[in-house]
């Protein structure tokens, strides 16, 4: 997420979504799923 912020990705995403004036409903889900550390090995 931090890399995307510094790279300007989020700004481009929001600019693209808000460019269409016909959009009546926009939603971005910021759900983060994490596994226990032992699940990765």
Image: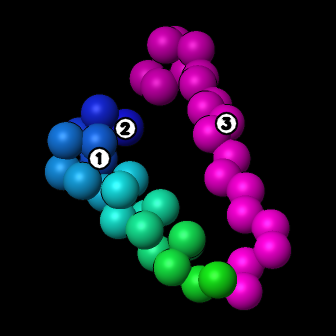
Residues at marks 1 and 3 touching, judged by CB atoms closer than 8 Å: no
Q: What's the mark number on residue 31?
A: 3
Looking at the picture, tell me which residue is in the foreground, 25 or 39.
Answer: 25
Identify the mark nearer the N-term, 2 or 3: 2
**Residue drawn at point x = 59 percent, y = 23 percent:** 35
Q: What's the mark number on residue 4?
A: 1
The quadrant of the picture occupied by the N terminus is: top left
Local crowd size for mark 1, using a 10 Å CA cut-off: few (<14), some (14–19), many (≥20):
few
The quadrant of the picture occupied by the C terminus is: top left
Looking at the picture, tell me which residue is in the foreground, 5 or 18.
Answer: 18
**Residue drawn at point x = 29 percent, y = 33 percent:** 2
Q: Is residue 31 magenta?
A: yes
Element under label 2?
Answer: loop
In the image, 17: left or right of 27?
left
Identify the mark nearer the N-term, 1 or 3: 1
Q: CA distance from mark 2 to mark 3?
A: 12 Å
Q: What's the mark number on residue 37?
A: none
Q: Is residue 30 magenta?
A: yes
The range drawn in magenta is 22-41
- For residue 3, which quarter of the picture? top left
Q: What's the mark number on residue 1?
A: 2
Residues at marks 1 and 2 touching, judged by CB atoms closer than 8 Å: yes
In the image, 39: left or right of 16?
right
- Residue 17 location (% of width, % of height): 55, 72
């Amino acid at each position: 997420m931090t890399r995307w912020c510094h790279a300007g990705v989020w700004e481009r995403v929001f600019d693209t979504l808000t460019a269409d004036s016909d959009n009546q409903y926009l939603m971005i889900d910021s759900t983060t799923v994490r596994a226990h550390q032992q699940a990765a090995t």
